[in-house]
Amino acid sequence: MRRVVATFAPWVMDELRLYRLAAHVAPDNIASAKVLLRNGFFEEGTMRCAAVKDDALLDLRLFARVRERLPE
């Protein structure tokens, strides 16, 4: 998965001229969080009560990869 994110994230940002790419991760999904962190994403915070699973509200961790300037 690490190689998929390493290939996909820069490609989609270039192709769609994005300056920000965000991902949401369940708090207990440590492996996905590590993949994002190793591929240039930063954790920005927690989205409280952002999803419903098994009739319960679930927080989500918010990660983003950003460019320092707008794409040309």
Image (tube, grey):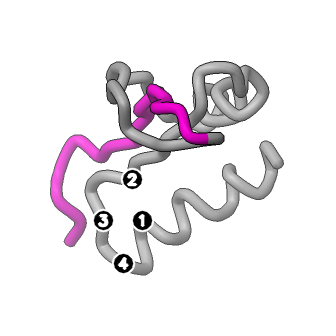
Q: Relative to 24, is 26 on the left or the right?
A: right
Q: Are marks 3 and 4 in contact (CB under 8 Å)?
A: yes
Q: Position of residue 43 (x, y in %)?
A: 43, 22
Q: Between disc 1 and disc 3, whose residue precedes? A: 1
Q: Is residue 56 above or below residue 2?
A: above
Residue at image mark 1 = 13
Kindly check if marks 1 and 2 are in contact, taking CB atoms under 8 A apart as contact: yes
67 on left or right of 27: left
Q: Main secondary structure of the magenta part?
A: strand
User: Could you tell me if the residues under marks 1 and 4 are in contact, i.e. CB atoms within 8 Å?
Assistant: yes
Residue type at numbered disc 1: Met
For marks 1 and 2, give the CA distance: 7 Å
Residue 72: percent from left, percent from top: 20, 72
Q: CA distance from mark 1 to mark 3?
A: 5 Å
Badge 4 amino acid = Leu
Name the disc covering residue 16, or none: 4
Which residue lies at the image location 44% right of the left edge and 33% below the top edge? 63
Q: Position of residue 27 (x, y in %)?
A: 59, 21
In the image, the segment drawn in magenta is 55-72
Residue under pointer 2: 21
The three-letter amino acid code for the residue at tag 2 is Leu
Q: SS for tag 4? A: loop
